[in-house]
């Protein structure tokens, strides 16, 4: 019974922490940037152009330089990625996303470190991936679907 109450209290505290993160300036900036990026027709055109070509790129990658469209697709994918990455709203979103990820990484490290220095805490930030923290890195990619 005591373990169950303790578990409930821990989960409630975790929910409070999540609410604090959601109400933070960093999360608010992330939401604003995401909204602007998702609702701008030109930005979405660039993202969709890149995403659509990514499918062809993956097919070409399977055959390598022997694929008849290899050179064209390789050149276009770099061109489309650059155009997308240089879009001011995509760039602003990526900065906000990195800031939010940094906050989440710091929280994970604090919680994991408070439990034990041997706890593996996945982060996407090499700054946190030290021998003492045993960070494993997630390499997840952006939630916008453009990375």
Image (cartoon, helix red, strand yellow):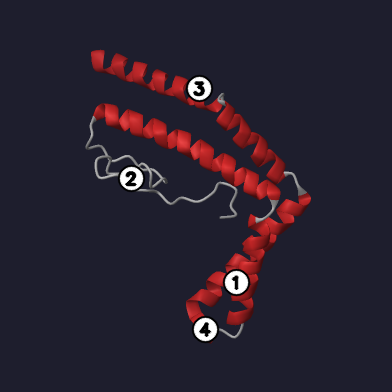
Residue 119 spot, x, y in % from top left: 25, 37
Front position among marks 1 and 3: 3
Query: Callout 4 environment at 10 Å: few (<14), some (14 to 19), or many (20+)?
Result: few
Residue that mark 4 sits on: 65
Ranked by sequence position, the earlier of labels 3 and 4 is 3
Residue shown at the point (35%, 16%) measured from the top left:
9
Residue 129 circle label: 2
Residue that mark 1 sits on: 56
Front position among marks 1 and 2: 2
Res. 32 visible in picture: yes
Q: Quadrant of the C terminus?
A: bottom right
Ranked by sequence position, the earlier of labels 4 and 1 is 1
Residue 20 circle label: 3
Q: Determine the secondary structure under disc 2.
A: loop
Q: Determine the secondary structure under disc 3.
A: helix
Ranked by sequence position, the earlier of labels 1 and 2 is 1
Residue 66 spot, x, y in % from top left: 52, 86
Q: CA distance from mark 2 to mark 4?
A: 36 Å
Residue extending farthest to the front is 127
Res. 104 image quadrant: top left
Do the residues bearing badges 1 and 3 touch, measured as CB atoms within 8 Å? no
Q: CA distance from mark 1 to mark 2?
A: 35 Å
């Amino acid at each position: 019974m005591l373990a169950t109450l303790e578990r409930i209290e821990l989960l409630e505290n975790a929910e409070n922490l999540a609410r604090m993160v959601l109400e933070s300036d960093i999360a608010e900036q992330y939401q604003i940037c995401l909204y602007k990026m998702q609702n701008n027709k030109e930005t979405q055109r660039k993202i969709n152009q890149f995403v659509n070509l990514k499918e062809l790129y993956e097919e070409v990658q399977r055959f390598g330089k022997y694929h008849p469209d290899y050179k064209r697709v390789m050149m276009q994918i770099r061109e489309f990625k650059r155009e997308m990455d240089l879009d001011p709203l995509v760039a602003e979103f990526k900065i906000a996303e990195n800031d939010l990820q940094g906050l989440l990484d710091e929280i994970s490290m604090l919680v994991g470190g408070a439990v034990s220095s041997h706890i593996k805490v996945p982060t996407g930030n090499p700054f946190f991936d030290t021998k003492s923290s045993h960070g494993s890195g997630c390499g997840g990619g952006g939630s916008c679907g453009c990375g």
